[in-house]
Structures are given as structure tokens and as C-alpha cells.
Amino acid sequence: MPIAIDGGRIPNRLTRENRARSIRSASRQETQAERIRIALINNMPDSALEDTEVQFVDLLESAAGDLPVSLKLFSLPKVPRGDAGQQHLNDFYFGINELLNTRFDGMIMTGTEPRQPDLRDEPYWHALGEVLDWAEHNTASTVLSCLAAHAGVLYSDGIPRCRLADKQFGVFEYRKVADHGLTAGCGESMQIPHSRWNEVRADALASCDYKILTQSAHAGVDLFVKKKKASLFVHFQGHPEYGVRTLLKEYRRDIKRFLRNERDTYPTMPHGYFDATAEKLLAEFREKAESDRREETMAGFPDAAMMDTMPHTWHTSGVSIYRNWLQQLISSKARVSQPTTMKRVVGG
């Protein structure tokens, strides 16, 4: 069943690709009470705004099956934007004040590229805290993705993120380390994409009563949870929503930054993502780029050769986790909507 976009503001790319429909055109048999209502707080940089919309709509649609799901789009204020990005938000997104005066079954919040070493110095920090406080009381469950997960544990429990020696970039194997309804049916191991310079560590999370569900000996923690007031907070350090080409686009972007002298070092190739043939071509391109450091060198990047080398190995796991998450939202919704029965007391 297609995901309904709440409020009728469907972004252009979703309209072109027929991936979503307005809630206004939904079947009359679908009432607001029957839908799983989700708020998507999309804070990604301008260049990734529309990609992120498509990724989450695709993932939720695959996970939902016959479940009716509606999505309403929001973004934190004061996230740095260019003119085009701000116009996109003005056209298709709703304000945070509207979010804070509404209840949703679930919320998903993405990260953005940090500008400050300490996230508490970011201009959107106050608004982020307001949304997290709201979510504890006004959702059954909240998903925090990557930087949003780091911000969430810092805000709630004072857990700092730790800088990595190199970018955690690629597709990594994670194993289940605890049983939980979110990972039911996922198998003992799963592939999950990551793209981050920082991490929150298992010992710090455990000391604050977070339950770690998946972990890698080489790549640290991925999925972890904690109940906060009325809401189960679900944290991913990785990106199960990523499309098959997302890591390639990020790798190309980072290479361009190197060629423009916006970064000092050539980016590390994403782990576990390309086959041996593609890795050889990319190593040859790196030699050219390092010897001819001009943006024009990017014209020789072997895009065409990459097309068939990137299997979507994480899709099944991502769909399974989000299907379990939607089922939990449905169960919570059913419990809330059950009428309270009053027993009549008969006096003697």
C-alpha cells in the first residue's frame, strides 16, 4: 500500500516517481484512526533532502505491506540551508510548532552534517531538545538516525560521541546480541550501511540503561533502545534506509571535496560495498586524482562500471526491523483505542 503524505504536500520527486499519494485522495474507508501516523523530521543537508524522502518512503512502503501509513514532513529550524533547500521546506514541510501541538504514533528524526565539535553548540540544539521532550510523551516510539541518535543520548543522558580515527563508511556485518521484538525474524547477523566520523560506545550506553540489540566487533554498536516516558526510543548509528547507490554518491561527493581542496586527505573507499573489479577501477582513479588534483579530473570517474557492483544486501534486514516497528505502533494504537469497561457493582 502506498504511503500517504499527510496534508497533501507531496514533494515533486515523490510525485514524479509515483511513490506516494496525498492523504486527501485516500479511500473513504481509511479513517484517521486506522492509519499509523508518523512524523518524519528530515534534517539532512539540502543535497540529500529529496533522496532521504524517497529512501524512507520506499523503506516504509516495503515494511508496511497492507498497513495504512501516513507520513507528515517536518525539519528542525536553524539547520543551515541554501535558498533551494529552504524553498523546498517552505513548499512541502510543516513547522515544528504544529508538530509540538499534535500527537503521532511514531516519529523518525534524521541527522545532518554537524558544524560544531560539541552538538550542544549547534544552532538547532534548543529546538531538537523540545522535539525530543515532546516525543517522550506524544509518540509510542521514536526512531533517531545516526547524528540524531548521538544528539538524543547526549541530550537525555549526557553521553558524548567519540571521534573515530577514520570515517566509518561502508556496509558492515552486525550480529544480534540481545532479543527484542524489533529484530524478530532478522536472523543472527545483518548487513547495515554506515557513514559517520563519530560513535557512541557500548559501555557508555549500558551504564545509562540502553539495551544494545546489534553490535559488530569491528564497527561498534548499531541498533540500541531505551524506554523514555511513554515512548520507546530506537537508535541507529547506521542507515538501514539507504538506497543502493547512496554510499556511491557520498563517496563521489567526498572525492570532489578532495579535488576542490576542501579536505586534506583522499576519502577511504566504502567497506564491503564494491566488488573486486570495481575496487581495482577505483584504486586506479585514485592514483589519477592524487596526481592531478583538479575538479575536472572527476570527469574520468568510472560511474558506469559501478552500476552492477552494489548489491542491496541490507534491504531485507532494514525492511524486517521497520516492519516490526510498525507492528509495535499498531499494537500500541490498539491498546490506546480500547474502550474502558466499567463493571457494575451490585449492592447487597
Image (cartoon, rainbow, N blue to C red):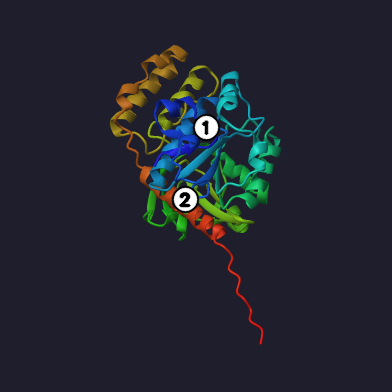
Nearer to me, 11 or 217: 11
Instruction: State the separation of the CA atoms marked 1 and 2.
Output: 22 Å
**Rendered location of residue 117, percent (x, y):** 65, 35
Residue 299 x, y percent position in the rendering = 39, 14
Image position of 315 (left or right of 118): left
For residue 187, what is the image quadrant?
A: bottom left
Q: Residues within 10 Å of mark 1 (few under 14, many from 20)?
A: some
The N terminus, quarter of image = top left
Picture residue at 40% right of the left edge, 23% below the top? 286
**Residue that label 2 marks:** 326
Residue kind at label 1, given as amino acid type = Gly
In the image, residue 259 sits, relative to residue 243, either above or below, namely above
Q: Quadrant of residue 92?
A: top right
**Residue 14 visible in the picture:** yes
Q: Earlier in the sequence, mark 1 or mark 2?
A: 1
Residue shown at 47% from the left, 44% from the top: 69
Residue at disc 1, secondary structure: loop
Disc 2 marks which amino acid? Leu
